[in-house]
Image: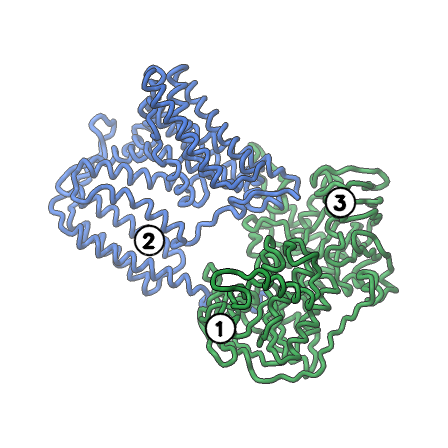
Chain colours: A green, B blue
Amino acid sequence: MDVELKAITKRFGAVVANKDVTLQVRAGEVLGLLGENGAGKSTLMNVLCGLYRPDEGQIVINGTPVQFTNPGDAIAAGIGMVHQHFMLVPVFTVAENVVLGVEPVGRLNHLDLKTASAKVREISARYGLTVDPDALIETLPVGVQQRVEIIKVLFRSADVLILDEPTAVLTPQEVEDFFGIVRSLRDAGKAIIFITHKLNEILEIADRISVLRAGRIVGESDPATATKADLAEVMVGRPVHFEVDRSGAAPGDAMLVIKDLTVLRDDNTIAVDNVSLTVRGGEVLGIAGVQGNGQSALIQAITGLMPAARGTIRFLGQDITHASVRARHKLGLAHIPEDRQRMGLIPDFTVAENMVLDSYYDPRYARGPQVQWDAVNQWAATAAAAFDVRTTSVFAKAGHLSGGNQQKLIVARELSRDTKAVIAAQPTRGLDVGSIEYIHSRLMAARAEGDAVLIMSSELDEILALSDRIVVMFKGRIVAEFDANVEKPEKSQIGLAMAGVAA
Amino acid sequence: MNGAETLQRPNAAIDLGARRRTRIVGAILILLAAFVVVVLGDAPGDATFRLSRPRDVWVLPDLIVPAQPFIYIAAALTAFLGARQFLRGGGRWTTLSLGLGLGLGVLAFLVWATAGNAFSLTGMLQATMVRAVPIALGGLAAVMCERVAVVNIAVEGMLLAGAFTGALMGSVVGGWGGLLSAVVIGGLFGFILAALVVTYRMDQIIAGVVINLFVLGLTSYVSSQVFAEMRHLNNAPVFRAIDIPLLSDIPVIGPMLFQQNIFVYGALIMVAVSTYYLFHTRNGLRARAVGEHPRAADTLGIDVYRTRYLHVTIGGMIAGFGGAWFTLGSVGRFDENMTGGRGFIGLAAMVFGRWHPVGALMAALVFGFTDSLQQKLALLQTPIPSEFLAMAPYVATIVVVAGLIGRARPPAADGKPYVKE
């Protein structure tokens, strides 16, 4: 089945998400759709799968123009989407999730789960997607959940598969398996649109590449001849430097020492299991791991947001295991949290208010209980300028800034004081290349000043680019450690550790 | 993939919390055993439980229990269960032990209260069923709403509206007309709740409270101002018990389940039907998907808003039917605030019953049991105020909600409005 998008324009209020986009994909090929976060890839695909209606332009299937008013229409037309955030009900079984919406039924509307299971088995056998139809989704690893999503789409007889950032949640080994699946689907005559911002992947899997920037198609290229640097330049609109200057490693004294730390989640299961770590001044320690293996809990225990069940955390020689968040902050611990919208900022507060969330009580900004707004605004303006936070004024709502500027605002607040350690969780998730470069340079500046820097990221490339040492967490434990200054570890080595295969 | 399996760790080290919970349960059981011995230990004579009534077809002999030995044995068993929890409890045993221990405690209490006396067990079970009906129907209404992720605090108001409408319309057009009107009014309030929370995305708790206060105010006003003057408007016929042939002659069970009025039969049928509907039909699967992950349902072409409207309205109709029990199934006239919080207890039954229709019914039976037990004890004139016993089910609910007996998990999207992009 061939699908064509003709001159699609989609607006949200005054914002133009897609402008005049024309794309086509044919049966038996993989079209790579490349673009940065916010370039309009997801919006475009939501138009194609019927969640949004285009303001202009049309969708043409096998030469016939069609109109989708809801996702059901697109499914009926043979278009299936595997969303970046899985659309699976965790407490349902695989079979229940697969048939949801098109359930086989018997007499009295009785759900025919036997037929459903049989059908799931048949599809998994045909495309090599091993899945137990009776397993509960919440018990399955993400890689398997993704296969369920694909089976779900195939069960609806889709001929066009849209894969939205499908590798974001996978380990490097799972990515290889996944590419195998994509190839077998292509060979079975499916048309596949593969959306990503990762250059390596698109060069490996795509038959053709279209690049989207700021809502427009800005280039097409052939993966056989294109290079990473070319693609990056088209995607970002200027030359990009991939390497971070990490020269001059001068690790000093141990500043942050964690010993036998155990942290429990709310439901009393173990998130961090007996972890010991040391971060020295002037070095970057990277924590790699597939999301949900205890990295977040470890960071939150260090920063005081989660209590430690066992073990000790020492910072600058002091025991801070049970210290308050403010006490840790005053000792010089900076925290760039994982989720900027929910933990890093108050989106409805202004830039200035967000800038003093950690220091509003300080005599510089407060006289007794009264906030000195002039001082706050003045300082916020200075800090915003120093950290390249692009905002109309310090009175703008933080929630109205772009993701990159929100993150720079957080970095400005956390780093524009005398810090001793920087704890950064997913510091560049979802940001444009320019902001990523800037934030990386700030983290390296903190390292150069002799701070202990701890970085947690699910992007392995980021960990490899920044870290002097790398530890890998799996099921709450540290399962591997690499010294990048001695010998740069291979991605596959780290990948195996991320999947829990002991080195 | 294989990696994930190779490094699976044994569960032994996991879950420090479970061990703590086990210990707490053990301590509760041992304290309970001590309480039974110290407070209830002095019980001379035998406790006589009547299992049949004089008119019954098959008459069972009375059950005679020597009070003091029974109480000591019950205490010993409870203490044993508690000690076992301390030594090597955990897992499913925790829940089971707590349930058994509490059951033994209640039995010991019953024997102590009846010592040297006689007491009709059959009558009490029959009363249990009757008192459980409005709670079970309130709980079932709440289950229907929360399974599609709408929190329905308004169950109380819907019961009250059903009771009022049943009395008024029952007086005017007769019992069946009254019942039908009650169901329609319940459905109407369900629809209003759905409109407020689904379309206008009002806070679900506040919307529910608004409906409760509105219904309470309106019905109280009408009953004190209008019914006081025109008594013929508040004089509805009552649905009498219908004996089911053969089944109603079974001892103990017969009177409890098969010598009841249409409200009891209706509640049992609705629980069965909604269980089948929610867990074994296409639409039930879709409804649960809407309650767990509305966006996933939406991407599969399921209309989230329509599903919510439909189920909240059906929930309202069930509550309306349950409300009619207060007037058409019991006394035939409406009194101010006569539901007295049964709707809220229904919500507790839903939580206790883990968002399952059968669970809600079982929980309602527990509440109904203590309710009728309290009545009987008042007659037996025990030295402990019966109000204390009446608190027991709510203490149990708090224990359940606090997660002591595993965690009851509500639908994942419960209480959250769905915003279509």
**Quarter holding residue B60:** top left
Which residue is at a point 25% across and 49% down the rendered structure image?
A: B105
- Residue A204 appears in the rendering: yes
Q: Which residue is mark 3?
A: A11
**Quarter holding residue A175:** bottom right
Quadrant for the C terminus of chain A, please.
Answer: bottom right
Front label number (3 vs 1): 3
Q: Label 2: few (<14), some or many (≥20) within 10 Å?
A: many
* B181 or A314, nearer to the observer: A314
Q: Which mark is residue A261?
A: 1
Kindly state the secondary structure of the residue where label 1 is placed: strand
Distance from disc 3 to disc 2, alpha carbons, whole Å, reads: 59 Å
- Residue B8 appears in the rendering: no
Q: Give the amino acid at mark 2.
A: Leu
Q: Give the amino acid at mark 1.
A: Leu
Q: Which mark is residue B98?
A: 2
Q: Which mark is residue B351?
A: none
Give the letter of the chain under mark 1: A
Picture coordinates of residue A500 (x, y %)?
60, 69
Q: Give the amino acid at mark 3.
A: Arg
Q: In the image, is B43 to the left or to the right of B20? A: left
Q: Are marks 3 and 1 on the same chain?
A: yes
Distance from disc 2 to disc 1, alpha carbons, whole Å, reads: 33 Å
Which residue is at a point 22% across and 43% down the rendered structure image?
A: B110
The furthest residue to the left: B44
Picture coordinates of residue B172 (x, y %)?
40, 15
Front label number (3 vs 2): 3
Kindly state the secondary structure of the residue where label 2 is placed: helix
- In this rendering, is residue A398 above or below B164? below
Front label number (2 vs 1): 1
* B416 or A420, nearer to the observer: A420
Give the letter of the chain under mark 2: B
